[in-house]
Amino acid sequence: MNPPSATRPANLPEVTIRCREHGPLVVELPVDTQGAPTVTLRVNDHHGDAFPLPTEKRAVALCRCGQSGCRPFCDGTHREHQFRADETATAPSETTS
């Protein structure tokens, strides 16, 4: 995990969006010491209406392949369609003064 950004206060909870190789985007919510999420996640459609989300989970998988039967969420259909996506993050370039 990368250290907190210099522009973001260290005490704020951090939401992580992870790109799964050949799979969905996984939104991981920070949790408290009891395991409960410390932020609220809302996924809206293009009209601004919220999709119902599971409240007991600390992660939500969003479809990237476009084939899911429950879009915008992942249902694992990407495996049947041999979806391929293996993007990797590039290290920030070092700048010299």
Image (cartoon, rainbow, N blue to C red):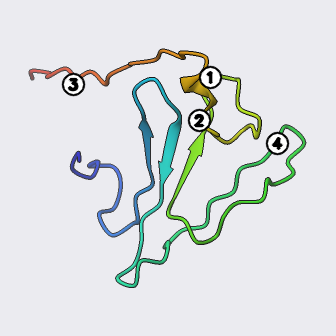
Q: From what the image shows, is residue 6 above or below residue 91?
A: below
Residue at numbered disc 2: 76
What is the crowding at mark 2: few (fewer than 14 residues within 10 Å), some, or many (at least 20)? some
Label 1 vs 4, first from the N-terminus: 4
Amino acid on which the number 1 mark rests in the picture:
Cys
**Which is more N-terminal, label 2 or label 3?**
2
Q: Amino acid at mark 4?
A: Asp
Q: Residues within 10 Å of mark 4 (few under 14, many from 20)?
A: few
CA neighbours of label 3 inside 10 A, class few (<14), some (14 to 19), many (20+): few
Kind of residue at disc 2: Gly
Q: Position of residue 58 (x, y in %)?
A: 50, 63
Question: If you read the primary sequence from the N terminus, does the residue marked by circle 1 or circle 3 appear first?
Answer: 1
Residue 46 x/y as whole percent: 85, 37
Q: CA distance from mark 1 to mark 4?
A: 17 Å
Q: Which mark is residue 25?
A: none
- Asked if labels 1 and 2 touch by Cβ distance under 8 angstroms, the answer is no
Q: Secondary structure at mark 3?
A: loop
Q: Residue at x 14, y 22 (%)?
A: 94
Q: Of all residues shown, which one is farthest toward the bottom?
A: 34
Alpha carbon distance from label 3 to label 4: 33 Å
Q: Position of residue 57 (x, y in %)?
A: 54, 65
Residue under the point 42% across and 65% down: 30
Q: Which mark is residue 65?
A: 1
Query: In the rendered structure, which amino acid carries the disc numbered 3?
Result: Ala
Of mark 3 and mark 4, the one earlier in the sequence is 4
Helix, strand or loop for disc 1: loop
Q: Which element carries disc 4, helix, strand or loop?
A: loop
Picture coordinates of residue 68, whole percent (x, y): 71, 32
| Residue 45 marker | 4
Q: How many marks?
A: 4
10 Å neighbourhood of mark 1: few (<14), some, or many (≥20)?
many
